[in-house]
Image (tube, helix red, strand yellow):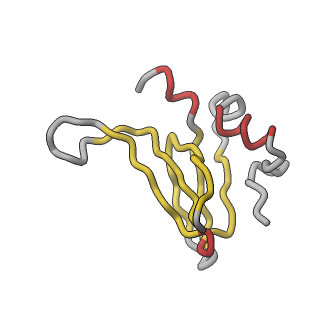
Amino acid sequence: MTSETNAFSTLSVRRVDGSRELHEYARILGLRGGYLFLEEGVLTDRSGNGIRTAAVHAIPLAEVAAVDVETHAGDDENSETTIGLESAGMLNFDGSVYVR
């Protein structure tokens, strides 16, 4: 992992059906067209040609109950994702992301 990895948090997406997805080293790219866009910073060689790329997920907002920032001691408190959510007033005291 590069030194840029600390810009990512482990995000948990809770779905309205009760299921939960864990996205390690992820950050929220934004909301658009009824979707929540997440980028996972773990690079993978999906092409099979040695080209390592990050995964981007488009999750329908209608399926999202909440997004939680999973904290690990010393890791996520100062991450770019957490700081951005706090400054936007979207981070609840329990670490979950405010959902309207």
The quarter of the picture where residue 10 lies is top right
- Say whether residue 4 is left or right of residue 68: left
- Say whether residue 96 is left or right of residue 76: right
**Residue 11 x/y as whole percent:** 59, 49
Residue 61 to residue 46: above or below: below
Residue 15 to residue 54: above or below: below
Residue found at the far bottom of this picture: 17
Q: Which residue sits at x=30%, y=41%?
A: 44
- Label total for image: 0
Indicate the quadrant containing the C terminus: top left, top right, bottom left or bottom right. bottom right
Q: Which residue sits at x=62%, y=75%?
A: 62
Residue found at the far front of this picture: 33
- Seen from the viewer's position, the closer of residues 83 and 74 is 83
The quarter of the picture where residue 86 lies is top right
**Residue 17 x/y as whole percent:** 59, 79
**Residue 58 x/y as whole percent:** 49, 60
Indicate the quadrant containing the N terminus: top left, top right, bottom left or bottom right. top left
**Residue 43 x/y as whole percent:** 35, 38
Q: Which residue sits at x=65%, y=32%?
A: 80
Residue found at the far top of this picture: 3
Q: Which residue sits at x=64%, y=37%?
A: 72
The quarter of the picture where residue 32 lies is bottom right
Residue 91 to residue 49: above or below: below
- Say whether residue 97 is left or right of residue 50: right
- Seen from the viewer's position, the closer of residues 75 and 67 is 67
